[in-house]
Amino acid sequence: MNVFSTLRLILLAAAVALIAQSNRCKPQAGGVSDFFPLAAGNEWIYQDSLWREGQLVSVFFDTLRVTGTNRFEGYPTYLLSDGRELMWRNDTLFQLVFQRSGYRFPTIYFVAGQQMVLFNYAFGGDVVIQRKSERLEVCPKVYGSGKNLCYRISDACGGDLILQQHAGPVYWRVGHCFAEEGSVLTKTLLHFRPGR
């Protein structure tokens, strides 16, 4: 058995264990799915800012949409215009990813909880980074009044994502693992439009 086969087995075992654990959890009061509201037609409009070596290079606009739905192991999934497929199970948001072999499996994307949670996130199927999810005492005034609850998801690549209750992802800072060297991309929510 080579290193890649061993890594695949470890990832598969970890994903199965996490899914089993999430199925035993009870959803928190207040609707944790409000932190990334997923319904066909939901739309987020962002102002994207590209920085190179600390200098603002360009500003442009970007739209993220829930384009449709699907199912995975009996659970509804939501297809996003950027190619991601997300799925809520109790207090955990999963992203469905593919291994190079074509095997599709869920990886944790976000965990709602009162305490800080550390978890592994698989991207590209075989590559794993550590993420941290924590509830913020004060929600940054990025979008709306700032009075809603927020969570921050940060990763070992310097990425940051803020999810705001009833609005979803209001701020993204793309980490260096996913950006061109020396560049930083930030996305700030301008408008959230629920689907009909």
Image (cartoon, rainbow, N blue to C red):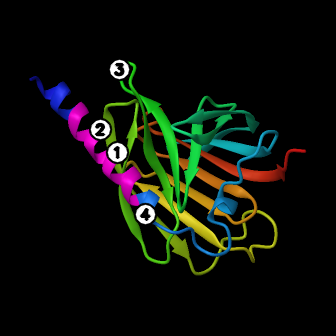
Looking at the rendered structure, the kind of residue marked 4 is Arg
Quadrant in which residue 39 is drawn = top right
| In contact (CB < 8 Å): disc 1 and disc 2 | yes
In the rendering, at what x and y percent does residue 163 appear?
Answer: 63, 60
Amino acid of disc 1 = Ala
Is label 1 in contact with label 3 (beta carbons under 8 Å)? no
Given the current orientation, which residue lies at the most extreme front position?
A: 74
| Residue located 80% across and 44% down the image | 42
Q: Is residue 168 left or right of residue 102?
A: right
**Distance from Cα at disc 2 to Cα at disc 3:** 13 Å
In the picture, the disc for residue 12 is: 2
Q: What residue is pinned by disc 1?
A: 15
Which residue appears farthest toward the right when viewing the image? 196
Q: In this view, does 68 lie to the left or right of 5?
A: right
The answer to whether mark 4 and mark 1 are in CB contact below 8 A is no
Is residue 27 one of those drawn in magenta?
Answer: no
**Label 3 with label 4: CB-CB less than 8 Å:** no
Residue 13: x percent and y percent? Answer: 26, 43
**Residue 6 at what x, y percent from top left?**
16, 32
Query: Few, some or many C-alpha atoms within 10 Å of disc 2 (few <14, some 14-19, many ≥20)?
Result: some
Q: Range of the magenta residues? A: 8-21
Residue lying furthest bottom in this view? 137
Mark 3 vs 4, N-terminal side: 4
The mark that comes first in sequence, 2 or 4, is 2
User: Residue tagged by mark 3?
Assistant: 100
Residue 24: assigned label: 4
Find out whether the residues at labels 2 and 4 contact each other: C-beta distance under 8 Å: no
